[in-house]
Structures are given as structure tokens and as C-alpha cells.
Amino acid sequence: MIAVVYSGSRFADWKLAERGKIVSEFKTQGINPFFSDKNSINQLLNKNVQLINNAEKINWVYFFGAGASSPERQKIISESFGSFFRYSRVVVDHDLKAAALAACGDERCVLGILGSGSNAAYFDGKKVHSNNFGLGYILGDEGSANWLGINLLKAFLNEKIPSDFEKLFLKKYDLDRTQILDKVYRQPQPALFLSYFSDFLMDHRNDTFVKQLVLCGFDAYFKTYIIPLKKQYPGAPVHIVGTVASGFEDYLRESATNNGLKINSVIKEPIYNLLKYYSNKN
């Protein structure tokens, strides 16, 4: 049996499969080594009944996640998983590698992520080339759920949000300035708080304010990530994965066209393609 895990900061998708057939599939809280230490990861694993029931049957665990981009952070995941999945080999890699395999297989491409955070890279068919992107929710993440949350809250706090939309926002969240600033600057894991608002924006995606906000984020995303990569690798097709990319796919393609780009595919949940990829290898 194999386990394939694709994790953002908010949620982790799990698929357990045997001989290519899914035995169990579920979501857990996201596992990001920037925010999760070994203790919190162990607690998460040990309270999931489906993992407890299948842990000793699993031979391979393939984990791909946001934040798992360096050997030090990958070690946090591999050691936690290794102690829980005692009879498994554990492979840990960055979410960019997972997205590349899911979207491009063994073909080269410019690969983008637009989910809780945002990132992009060139994949040569075997490895993801390093770059200076992936600056996180404070310095980067243009167009992502985090970016959308930040800019929605800024518009709300600066009284630049349309009154009708403000009423919808307050009916949904009942937040004031003090509460927002406390959650952003004093409470743990502010990135998770910021990313939650993307669901609300998707629910009201046809609102003019939402469309303008999303298009602004996507425009910044393409200019920051994709256009520089396309200049460096002009023949490589563009594939983008993630819940924000999928949830606003029409706006994403509109923004791409405005920036002279073509998107070959948009994938909401790369884990299904990952499962197929690794099922064929085991």
C-alpha cells in the first residue's frame, strides 16, 4: 500500500492506495514545516483513525508540501512520518515538485501554484530548477489565498470596500479592526487566518469588487512569477495548479491573455495525478 499526501498550509489531501485502487481518502489540517513542528505533526497523525488503522500496511509514503523546500524542513516531516509509519519508506519533497509531476509528468514546463500561497518554477522533466520565488505570505504569495485575504482586509479596514459587499462581509464574519489586527499580529499562524477569506470571495466571485481584486492579484502573479520564467524558457508550456487557480479559472485565463500568456492546463487537486504516477511505479 502507498500513501500520497499533498499539503498546503490550510489542508492536506491524503490518498491511500493498493495496486492503483484507492483504499481511503481524506483531508487533515495542513502540514507545513514553517508552522508545524514534530510534536504537532505527531499529534495530527495519532488522532486520525484511518491513518492508525492503515499505518502498518503502508510501504511507501510520498509527501509533498508547501514549506518543504530545504533539507532541514524536509527532515522535520520525514522524522515525524518515519516514527509513525514504521514499516514505510518516506519521500518528502516540495509542493512544486508534486505540481510538476501532476501537470507535466516527465515533460518540461513552466509550473505555477496558486493555492494558499503562490509559487512557480521551471521543470525540465526530471527536476524543478531553483529560483528566488517562494517568499511567503508577508513578502510574496501574489495572487494566492493569502494575498487575497490580505488585500480584502486592507480594503475593509481602510474603508475602500463597497458598502453592499461590506454588509455581506460583516454578516459572514462579524469582525472589527481590533479582532483583525489581533489575529494577524498576535495570534499564531496568521497565514491560515488570511487564507480562509478566499472561500468567501469564491462564493461571491461575480461581484465586481471581487473580480477586480482577483484580477489584480493574478496580474501581479503573472508579472512576478510566470513572465520572467517564460522569457527564460520561451518554449515551455504553462501549467498552473491549486484551488485559487481552479476556483477563479476564468479570471486566471483572462489575466493571462491580458499579459500575453497561454495557460495549457489548470488543475485543482494534483493529488489524483500524483497517485496515478506513483501507483505505476510501485
Image (cartoon, rainbow, N blue to C red):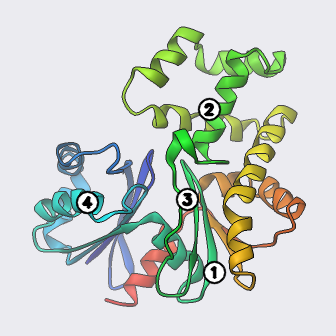
Residue type of the residue flagged with mark 1: Cys
Residue occupied by mark 4: 72
Q: Quadrant of residue 19?
A: bottom left
Instruction: Specify whether residue 230 is in view.
Output: yes
N-terminal-most mark, 3 or 4: 4
N-terminal-most mark, 2 or 3: 3
- Res 133 label: 3
Give 91 or 172, whichever is nearer the viewer.
91
* Residue 214 screen position, x and y as percent: 76, 43
- Residue visible at 59% across and 89% down in the picture: 107
* Residue 51 screen position, x and y as percent: 23, 58
Total labels: the figure holds 4
Residue type of the residue flagged with mark 3: Phe
Q: Is residue 100 above or below residue 143?
A: below
- Res 109 label: 1
Residue 159 is left or right of residue 122, and the answer is right
- Res 150 label: 2
* Residue 147 screen position, x and y as percent: 62, 40
